[in-house]
Image: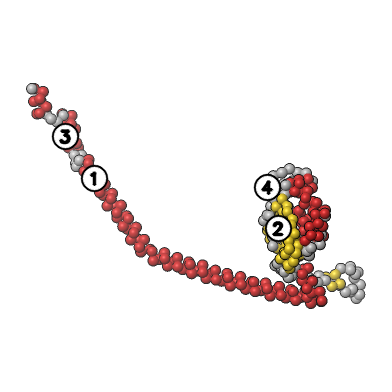
Amino acid sequence: MSLLTTVMEHSLDEGYAEASARRRAEGRDGLPRTLKAKLGLAGGLVLAALVVTLGAAEARVAAPVVAKEREELIDRVNAETSTADTLEADVDKLRKDVGERQRKALQEHGGDQGGLVALLSGATPVEGPGIKLVVDDAEDTDQGGGGPRESTGFADTGRVRDRDMQRVVNGLWQSGAEAIAINGQRLTALSAIRAAGDAILVDNRPLVPPYTVQAVGDGKKLVTAFQDSADGQYLQALHESFDIRTSISEQEKVRLPAAPSLIVRTAEPQAADTGSGAADTGKGTS
């Protein structure tokens, strides 16, 4: 009974009572922690709502400005695009005018053979029977040296090089081709096939494999003559040594475009200068 009486009379432990008295003495006896937490959470929510409200208000104010700037940018893009289209149309018109003048000049200098001169110089498109020769890199382009190139440098990989295409084109000319184009680019007597890094350039324009060579002429004779020529055998050796892929076929109709630009050049003998007493070098002017 004495224990129950003690519990009833002293329900709060003396340690808790002492701690409560100490907090009151130090002035830290405030609201319960649960209430403080609730108030802190409520304050945080109010602050977050205030930030969101201010952001929405600023976005609403800035929206018309952003929309106006976007419309102005679109208008500028459209205007520049229209200007570029106009300039491109002018370039095409001038290119056609230059081409017509070049063709007329070739016809005047060629006399009765003006059409043939324009054809051989690449000034006019050409259409007729011919062949299509496709040359492509090997599937595995990392191979050893030897073979027809007879060296161990980078050129002896399975990649087609500029000198390979030079030999192919020269072989086709020698076999009787009347006109040649590589990847749709017409070749002329002034065309150059060069390399820039790993790329092959034709008249300073890069080409990408596979290299499709189209030639106008007697298809059957062209195929036979090219395969029997030294350049045709060279291409076959590339295939056997480096797995460079090649295929050649006759075509009933081949259409080649005109060369994009031509330079008409003439040469005249230099008149001997008898008055100056200078020696005649025998050289002409171009």
Residue at the image point whose x is 16% and y is 34% from the top: 21
Between circles 4 and 3, the one closer to the viewer is 4
Disc 1: which residue: 38
Question: Which residue is denoted by mark 4 in the rendering?
Answer: 139
**From what the image shows, is residue 74 above or below residue 170?**
below
Q: What element carries label 1?
A: helix
Residue under numbered circle 3 = 21
Looking at numbered disc 2 in the image, what kind of residue is underneath it?
Thr
**Nearest to N terminus: mark 4 or mark 1:** 1
| N-terminal-most mark, 2 or 1 | 1
The answer to whether residue 140 of the structure is visible from this angle is yes
Q: Residue furthest top?
A: 2
Marked residue nearer the N-terminal end (4 or 3) = 3
Q: Which label's residue is closer to the chain start, 3 or 1?
A: 3
Q: Residues within 10 Å of mark 3 (few under 14, many from 20)?
A: few
Q: Give coordinates of residue 28: x percent, y percent.
A: 20, 39
- Using the numbered discs, state the Cα–Cα distance from disc 2 to disc 3 in whole angstroms: 100 Å
Residue drawn where x is 70% and y is 50% of the image = 137
Mark whose residue sits in front, 2 or 1: 2
Q: Nearer the viewer, residue 101 or 283?
A: 101
Q: What element carries label 2?
A: strand
Residue of label 2: 212
Three-letter amino acid code of the residue under disc 4: Glu
> Do labels 2 and 3 touch, CB within 8 Å?
no
Q: Can residue 151 be seen in this view?
A: no
Quadrant where the C terminus sits is bottom right
Mark 3, secondary structure of its residue? helix
